[in-house]
Image (cartoon, grey):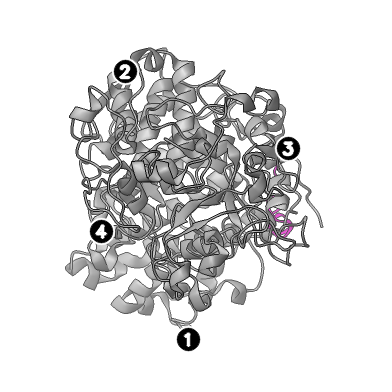
Amino acid sequence: MKKNHILSILLFSALGLSVQSCSDYLDSDYIFKNRETIEKVFTDRDKTEAWLATAFSYLSDDCADVCNKRQTPHCFADDMYYGDDDGSIQESKEGELSYNEFKEGTYDENTKQAIWQRCYRGIRQASLFLQYVDMNKELEEAGELADYKAQARFVRAYYYWLLLRRYGPVPLLPDEGLNYDDSYDDLATPRSSYESVAEYISQEMALAAKDLPLVRGENSASRPTRGAALATRTFALIYAASPLANGNNDEFAQLLVDDKGERLLSPDYSEEKWAKAAAAAKDVMDLNVYHLYTTDIRSTDSPAEPATIIPPYHEIYSNADFPDGWKNVDPFESYRSIFNGQTGMLDNPELIFSRGRNIGGQNIRDMVVHQLPLTATGWNTSGLTQKIVDAYYMNDGTNCPGMNSEYANIQAYNNVHRLDMSERPKGFTTQEDVDAGRYKPLAAGVSLQYANREPRFYASVAYNGAYWYLGNEEEAEDRNKQIFYYRGKRDGYNAGMFWLRTGIGVMKYVHPEDTYLNNDINNLRYKPEPAIRYADILLMYAEALNEVSDGTYQIASWDGSTTYTIHRSIEEMRKGFKPVRMRAGIPDLDDNIYADKETFRIYLKRERQIELMGEGKRYYDLRRWKDAPVEETTPVYGCNTLMTESEREMFHTPIAIWNLSATFSDKMWFWPISHSELKRNKRLTQTPGWTYND
């Protein structure tokens, strides 16, 4: 294609998946009002940078990793739910998706499809940038060209990553775009196999990493680093190694084919895929840039910044500094501060990638608005399930009484009869307990089911009777206040939609100063999006090594500078698993648990469930593990919200929640492709279980 072809033709030919009018895709026209030629665009520094910025702009809104439900409902799986727009109370509004519609898969093929369009537009934008940016000699002379090209390569591969985890196998477009002179049928592009897409992401991220810096400054904090590229590479490889895409021969996998009838999910199992994923995680670890965020022990005490609650004594961990123990850290504040805005992006050594403030509408602050109680002028509609509440450990690392005790996790929670009510603690804290310093941080009148839990529980769960500090509330009586969800209380059950269906709220992401006073989002502290955290990489390293049980593999590092010997090593698995537990203030696992592949897998899944709660990981984890048919169909349990304070024991007796759905069907392994895309691209095949036509 000649360089002097006008921009509109180039944009059209680069996408290749659509025959709509050019105007539908000229998202960059605001920069090029005069239909400028490629030479004018990519020889002008400002316009070149604006082009790259546009490529990144599609990462916001529906393409965000952590966002409120109207953009990314996938942050809500079997642990979190949202109650507003509940179909059992009222019909969900047009363009919105109620929790039950989301959970039941009753949305249609054209629901929530903006991510497909945004990703492919971003891919096109980045591809054109890479094709023509060498024309800009000013960037080359300034030494910025390599970085800019690496950024474009990163964002293009990241869009493919977002598509892969949601849609599974998707079309891989030629890097140089498609020729607009070709016929419509020749422009049509089939799905590539899951393995091919993952490998493409892996290769592109390795190439990007070579020219990306290890760290960014304040003005470019939301742009990718080498670690961001290598971490995304780890995601793609571990997903490709997981049961959904590795050795999957179930009925759904047999039906998911391209237009030639070729399978898109590999029926042949390869353990080496796990070894490659482990090596990719080690690539990130060996950068020696990231470590888990911790805060020092705090001796002063205030409602907003409580004194450190020291974990129960352990002869090893209580006497060792982090990461070998918890002697010098505050586990509660270390975890809480990552999410609530207390710690900025550049001050958090475990934040590998974040969009920063470029999340778009329905960002994390909007999610917090729905978590805040009515007392803080919040919506009081996003809450937690009993499953995640029971998943949190006691403060000594044991299981909470009454949870499924046959396993070390929630794996068999779907059998309701195994939920032993007789073992659950009875009774409530008293003012005498508070005065004596028992059951910290519980105030008086709180169920003993919530006593002596691990610090991440108190940083994440707004249990009945929890303190909401609400330091910026206008009325003094609304500050530093216990919030109860009993029927008849302000934040309890009511006939509308502003109440917690399980009687359990979400404290994660909430800062003590947050309030939605005057419906002003700026009254909430900004929270950096935890798109990729180092804790996630560490846990994936341990997970991948656990699955390498039958051999030893020699895997080259991302840049070929060294070769890793990958095998199932308890010592190496501990490097991934133990630091997360030490930061949380709970003991590491015993050797016999590490030694058993099946048992460790159970603990690993539970640790991800707890550590990454509310970060958009659980929904996809359940699918890649093929656990969704069990975990997603488990009845949602919670408190009996019809009970008043006079019936408080009955309130805290878990019951099935009638208006929160729990179901799963095979078509929900991946999101459907929209009818409009299927019509435009005749070689696209639909996800099994979904329809081809309106």
User: Distance between the Cα atoms at labels 4 and 3?
Assistant: 42 Å
- In the image, is residue 113 above or below residue 459? below
Residue at point 43% right, 73% down? 523
User: Distance between the Cα atoms at labels 1 and 2?
Assistant: 60 Å
Residue at image mark 1: 33
* Quadrant location, the C terminus: bottom right
Disc nearest the viewer among 1 and 2: 2
Whether residue 494 is visible: yes
- Of the two numbered discs 2 and 3 on the same chain, state the one appearing first in sequence: 2
> Secondary structure under badge 4?
helix
Residue at image mark 4: 346
> Secondary structure under badge 1?
loop
- In the image, is residue 16 above or below residue 141? above
Left or right? Give the position of 160 relative to 537.
Answer: right
Left or right? Give the position of 412 relative to 221.
Answer: right
- Residue type marked 2: Ser
Span highlighted in magenta in the image: 672-688
Task: Please state which of residues 384 and 91 is positioned toward the viewer in this rendering.
Answer: 384
User: Distance between the Cα atoms at labels 4 and 2?
Assistant: 34 Å
Residue at image mark 3: 665
**676 part of magenta stretch:** yes
- Residue type marked 3: Ser
- Residue type marked 1: Lys
Quarter of the image for residue 661 reads top right
- Of the two numbered discs 1 and 2 on the same chain, state the one appearing first in sequence: 1
Number of residues whose C-alpha sits closer than 10 Å to that of mark 1, classed few (under 14), some (14–19) or many (20 or more): few
Rendered location of residue 474, percent (x, y):
45, 76
